[in-house]
Structures are given as C-alpha cells and as structure tokens.
Amino acid sequence: MSDLIEPFEIRVPDAVLDDLRERLARTRWPDQIEGAGWDYGTERGALQALCEYWRKEFDWRRVEAALARFEHGVTTIDGQRIHFLHAPSPHPGALPLVVTHGWPGSILEFLKVVGPLADPVSHGGEARDAFHVICPSIPGYGFSEPTRTRGWDVQRVAEAWIELVARLGYTRYGAQGGDWGALVTSQIGRLDPESCAGIHLNMAIALPPADAPPLSEKEQRWVAELQAFQRGETGYQQIQSTKPQTLAYALTDSPAGLAGWILEKFCTWSDCGGDVLSVFTKDELLANITLYWVTGTINSSMRMYYETLKSGRVGVTQGKVEVPTGIAIFPKELYKPPRAWADRHYRVTHWSEFDRGGHFAAMEQPDAFVKDVRAFFRTLR
C-alpha cells in the first residue's frame, strides 16, 4: 500500500449533531393539498414523521460503529481528498473489486453486501468468490469532502479510481456500480482494459443502434417506463445539471429540506409500491441523509450533474467498452436497456433479470445483488 494513503476514523463532533436536532425542532413546514399524497413530491406527513424520529430517536453513533467494522483511508488524487472503505478478504486469491455508489446514495448503500463479498465463507458462500472490496466516496460526496475545483465528471472520477487501486497495490481488479457508479465503472472499463478484468452494472445506459431489431413486448414496456420517467421524474436532473448552487442554499440550511429532497428519490426509484418504509428502515434512510448533512456535501454531490453534462464525457458516446460486462436488470430500475442496445455499448457476457428490486439494488435486494456479482466475476478469475 502506498504511503500516500492515511488511515481515517469517522467521528462527527457532538456539536454538529446537536445543531442538527435544534434545526429540526425549528422546521417551518409548507402547506399541502389535502389527499395529494406524493403527487406533488414528498408527502408532508411522511416527512414530518421521519424528521420527528430523526430528532428524537435516530442514533448516528450506531452508523459510525457499523462503518468502523471496516478499514477506512484517505488519499489525495488530482488535488482532491478521496475517502474510501476497504475490506480486504481473508481468503487468498481474492479479486479486488471497486464498488461505486451514485446520487443520492453513498457508501452506506453497500453495508449489507461488503461482508458477503469480502468473506463469502462466513456468509454461506465459497472462498473462490472472495473479493478485496474497495468502496470509495465519489469526490464531493461524504467524507471525500466537497470538490474545490471544476471538472469532476464521471471520467475524472474513473481516472481517480484507477489511481486509487494502484496505490492500494492491486494490479488486476473488477469494478461494479449503479447510477453514477455505473457511468464511472463503464469509464474504468474503457480507460483501463489492461488491468480491469471486467465490470458489473446494475444500471446500464445504452442508446438504440440504427439497425436495432424489433423490441419484444417486455422491452417495449421497459422503453415506455423510461419515457414516462423522463417526462415526469427528471426535474431534479434539470436543476442539478444547470443551477445546483441555487438549490444548495435551501438544502444546506434545512435538514428537513434535505430529507425531503432525498426521501422522494428513495420512494420513487425503489421497488416499494409507494410505501418507502416497506423496503427501507427509517434508520437506513436517515443514515444516508445524515451523512450528507454532517459532511455538508449535498451541493458538491449535485455538481456532478453539472460537470458531466458540461463535459459530455458520459461513456456511451466515447466508444464501446470492450472488457467483459455483466448487466443486472432489476424491475424498478430507471434505465433498463434492451439487450441489443446494451450490446452496442458493452461486450456483454452476463445478463440477469430479476423479479424484485429497484434503483438501490444493494440495499433492496442484497442477496440477489451479491449472487449476481459473484456469478459474473467467477468466469474472470
């Protein structure tokens, strides 16, 4: 391991948590049309109940304890501090695996799967499927701290991850991701085919080829769902990719506002049927929201939309990813490309479709997620 890496301990000052609770107690709530539910955005009653629990019962120290089960490090790459969780496997021959989160998630998305991936024997699996898990916080997210310069798009993040893996002493590795993590992972496969053995995606962005075959009934439904999402659910994208700073004043000052902005995505993007607490516990939701709050990174996390839109370096327009690619399709994922579309952009060697799960696959369906990652990389060791 490089001497450029320093150990890191997560410990949020009590004063930050006290201030959070005081702000929650002073929340000024907006009105809501009676019976509107989630039609206009986050339902007020659901958010009020969550914020009340946040103020009175949620225990951030339990989150810190859960994270402390793993190694954490920081290093500076391309002028930016990078935080990462590292779970070396106890099994010889384990394959290094870089796992990348998205927005509005964080490394906390992977807490249920890091253990099974790193130590499969202790979780009912086989040693041959072991990984050395590296889970970095994207620059501008979590303990990687806010970005200080322009230009942190998905390609620049991928370049930083390639350097991080090298500093950890790994010469051959795999990569996995969803949401922004899928775009970062795709860039890794494109930029570092000599060292990257393969990539696994639980959200694949793909455009239709000119000679695309007719779509099946199921694929037609997938495309229709994507079109409906683009029409009715992408307002956040337009704001965050054009004027994130303007929105950040509200979300950085009001924890209830921050929670409302993030909660709606976990409800809308997951396979919860409109009942977000049927899939996530209040503690899981608040752990992720609190991480954004205590690190002050909601603004810089949103800037990734601006930077990537500005650069246009999103992968799908930069050439085919030639490393072996596994794609897992969960039914409530936002982007579910027909196989022929995916084949245009990736060398797809593994394709799985699931009956349950949504955008936050590692949280929603951790067992299915782990099994699919193991199955794909089993052929590449």
Image (tube, rainbow, N blue to C red):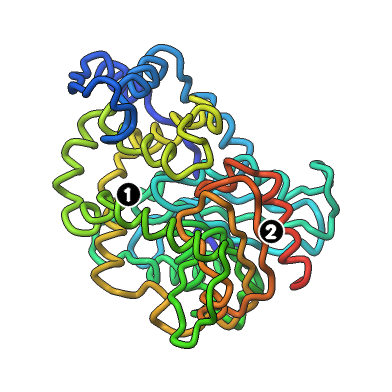
For the point 51% across and 60% down, the residue is 203
- Report the disc number at residue 295: none
Q: Secondary structure at mark 2?
A: helix
Q: Secondary structure at mark 1?
A: loop
Of the pair 98 and 219, the residue shown nearer to us: 219
Give residue 248's quadrant in the image: top left
Which residue corresponds to mark 2? 373
Q: Residue furthest left?
A: 246
| Residue type for callout 1 | Glu
Question: Nearer the viewer's eye, disc 2 or disc 1?
Answer: 1
| Residue type for callout 2 | Val
Seen in the picture, residue 297 relative to 20 is either above or below; the reply is: below
Q: Judge left or right: residue 199 versus residue 206.
A: right
Q: Are marks 2 and 1 in contact (CB under 8 Å)?
A: no
Of the pair 378 and 40, the residue shown nearer to us: 40
Label 1 crowd (10 A; few <14 / some 14-19 / many >=20): some
Which residue corresponds to mark 1? 233
Q: Where does residue 136 sit, x and y in percent of width and height? A: 50, 54
**Distance between mark 2 and mark 1 Cα atoms:** 29 Å
Quadrant (top left, top right, bottom left, bottom right) of the C terminus? bottom right
Of the pair 381 and 163, the residue shown nearer to us: 381
For the point 43% across and 39% down, the residue is 266
Q: Judge left or right: residue 372 versus residue 50.
A: right
Q: Where does residue 369 sit, x and y in percent of width and height? A: 66, 51
Seen in the picture, residue 57 relative to 237 is either above or below; the reply is: above
Seen in the picture, residue 50 relative to 240 is either above or below; the reply is: above
Q: Judge left or right: residue 378 versus residue 98.
A: right
For the point 83% across and 60% down, the residue is 128
